[in-house]
Image (cartoon, grey):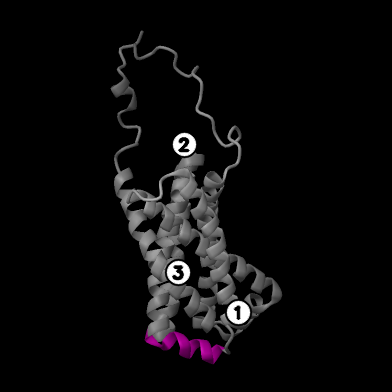
C-alpha cells in the first residue's frame, strides 16, 4: 500500500505554528549567530590581509573597525561567537545524554544569554 | 497502483549516508570552539588598537599567529558546516546545491587569505 495518500497528509507543525519558546528560540539563535559569525570572519580576514599587504588599506580598515560603528559591530560579533560557542556546547552536553529535560534546557538557554553577555562585557572592558 | 515500495521510493534521496559523520565532525569542532573562541577573541582584541608596525610585530609572535591560524581553519570550517545545514534545510534543488558550493568557496577563500596574511606577517 505504498502509494496511498501521498502528499495529502497532515504536516507536522513548523515555526509559524508553534508558540515561541525559550528552547526553540535559543536554538534558532545558535544557527543565526553561527551564520553571522561567518560574516565576522570576513571582517577579521579583511583586517589581517590588509595588515599583511598594504599600509594604506590597513589604515582604512583599521580606522573602520575602531570607529564607533566598528566598535558596535565588533561587540555584536563578539557576543554572537560567544553565544554560538555556548549553544554548541549545550548541543555537546545533549549529545552525551545530559540536561535533556525541558526545565534544565530552559535554564541553560538563559545561562547562554547571560554568560555570552558577561564574556562580551569582560572583553569590552579588558581591551 | 505503481509497483513502488516504500524502500525504493527513498533509496538515493540522500539521508543517512553522511549524516552521522557530519554530526560527529560538528561535535568535535564544537568542543574545540570552547577553547579557540575565548583564545582568539582575546588575541584579536589585544592586537587591535596598535599602529601598523605594532600589528605586524604582534602577529610575528608565535602565540598570536598560531592561535589565529588555528581559529581560521577550525572555526571557519565549523561555521561553514553550520551554514551548510541551514542551507540544506531551507534551500532546495539546484539553488540549494549552488548555494552550498558558493558558501564552500567563500569559506575556503577566507581560510586561505587569512592564513596567507599570517604567514606573510609571521615569516
Q: Does A15 appear in magenta?
A: no
Query: Which quarter shows the N terminus of chain B?
Result: top left
Q: Mark 3 vs mark 1: same chain?
A: no
Q: Nearer the viewer, residue A71 or B9?
A: A71
Decide which of B14, A57 is in the foreground and name it.
B14
Work out which residue is located at the far front of the displayed protein and give it: A103
Tell me which residue sits at (47%, 90%) in the image: B57
Which chain does the numbered disc 1 sit on? A
Instruction: Determine contact: label 2, label 3, CB under 8 Å.
Output: no
* A11 and A36: which is toward the camera: A11
Mark 3 secondary-structure assignment: helix
**Mark 2 = which residue?**
B93
x and y percentages locating residue B91 in the rendered image: 51, 40
The image quadrant where one finds the C terminus of chain B is: bottom left
Q: Mark 3 belongs to which subunit?
A: B
Give the residues in magenta.
Answer: B52-62
Residue B50 lies in what quarter of the image?
A: bottom right
Q: Which residue is mark 3?
A: B37
Compared to residue A34, the image places residue A50 above or below, namely below
Q: CA distance from mark 3 to mark 1?
A: 17 Å
Query: Residue B27: x percent and y percent?
Result: 35, 55
Label 2 or label 3, whichever comes before in sequence order: 3
Q: CA distance from mark 2 to mark 3?
A: 34 Å
Q: Chain of mark 2?
A: B
Please indicate, yes or no, whether residue B106 appears anywhere in the rendered image: no
Residue lying furthest top? B1
Q: Main secondary structure of the magenta part?
A: helix
Q: In terms of secondary structure, where does tag 2 sit?
A: helix
Asked whether residue B97 appears in the rendered view, the answer is: yes
- Residue positioned 52% across, 83% down in the render: B46
For disc 2, the neighbor class at 10 Å (few under 14, some 14 to 19, many from 20) is few
- Per the image, the residue denoted by label 1 is A125
Amino acid at each position: 500500500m505504498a502509494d496511498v495518500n501521498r502528499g495529502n497528509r497532515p504536516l507536522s507543525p513548523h515555526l509559524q505554528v508553534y508558540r515561541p519558546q525559550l528552547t526553540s528560540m535559543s536554538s534558532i539563535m545558535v544557527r543565526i549567530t553561527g551564520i553571522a559569525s561567518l560574516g565576522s570572519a570576513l571582517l577579521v580576514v579583511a583586517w589581517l590581509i590588509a595588515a599583511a599587504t598594504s599600509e594604506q588599506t590597513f589604515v582604512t580598515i583599521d580606522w573602520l573597525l575602531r570607529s564607533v560603528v566598528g566598535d558596535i559591530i565588533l561587540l555584536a560579533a563578539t557576543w554572537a561567537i560567544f553565544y554560538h560557542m555556548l549553544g554548541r556546547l549545550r548541543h555537546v552536553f545533549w549529545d552525551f545524554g545530559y540536561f535533556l529535560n525541558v526545565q534544565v534546557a530552559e535554564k541553560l538557554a538563559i545561562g547562554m544569554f547571560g554568560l555570552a553577555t558577561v564574556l562580551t562585557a569582560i572583553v569590552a572592558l579588558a581591551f | 497502483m505503481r509497483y513502488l515500495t516504500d524502500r525504493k521510493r527513498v533509496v538515493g534521496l540522500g539521508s543517512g549516508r553522511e549524516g552521522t559523520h557530519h554530526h560527529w565532525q560538528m561535535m568535535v569542532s564544537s568542543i574545540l570552539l570552547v577553547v579557540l573562541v575565548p583564545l582568539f577573541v582575546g588575541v584579536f582584541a589585544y592586537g587591535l588598537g596598535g599602529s601598523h608596525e605594532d600589528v605586524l610585530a604582534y602577529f610575528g609572535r608565535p602565540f598570536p599567529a598560531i592561535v589565529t591560524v588555528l581559529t581560521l581553519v577550525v572555526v571557519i570550517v565549523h561555521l561553514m558546516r553550520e551554514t551548510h545545514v541551514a542551507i540544506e534545510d531551507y534551500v532546495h534543488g539546484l539553488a540549494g546545491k549552488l548555494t552550498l558550493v558558493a558558501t564552500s568557496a567563500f569559506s575556503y577563500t577566507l581560510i586561505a587569505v587569512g592564513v596567507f596574511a599570517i604567514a606573510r606577517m609571521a615569516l
